Image: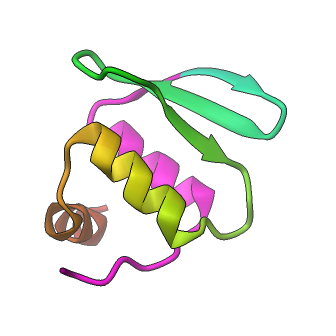
Amino acid sequence: MPRLPSISWKKFEKFLLFVGCKFVREKGDHRIYWRIGMTRPVVVPRDSALPVFIIRNNIRVLGISPGEYNEILKQI
């Protein structure tokens, strides 16, 4: 399995917008994103660097493999 780098929440937000998610709301320091066809929203805390387990869980919700995720990160 490809290694997932820890990135900032702003870079992860760019990734989410690139794959078609829309910002819905913000509660405290958590930003909520949604895309049609998802069963649950993507929640991103506004930390300086997102832990890998948050990235892994959110790309699982999106239905994107770690390899696809790394390729998309190279594009943005």
User: Is residue 15 among the parts visible in the rendering?
Assistant: no
Q: Quadrant where the C terminus lies?
A: bottom left
Residue depicted at 52% across the width and 57% down the height = 54
Quarter of the image for residue 40 reads: top left
User: Is residue 17 among the parts visible in the rendering?
Assistant: yes
Determine if the magenta segment contains residue 51. Answer: no
Residue depicted at 71% across the width and 26% down the height = 26
Determine if the magenta segment contains residue 4. Answer: yes
Left or right of residue 36: residue 67: left
Left or right of residue 12: residue 38: left
Left or right of residue 39: residue 27: right
Q: In the rendered image of this protein, does residue 62 appear above or below residue 6?
A: above
Q: Position of residue 71 (x, y in %)?
A: 17, 69
Total count of labels: 0
Q: Quadrant where the N terminus lies?
A: bottom left
Q: Position of residue 25 (x, y in %)?
A: 65, 19
Q: Position of residue 16 (x, y in %)?
A: 39, 43
Q: Position of residue 31 (x, y in %)?
A: 65, 34
Q: Magenta span covers which residues? A: 1-23
Left or right of residue 46: residue 37: left
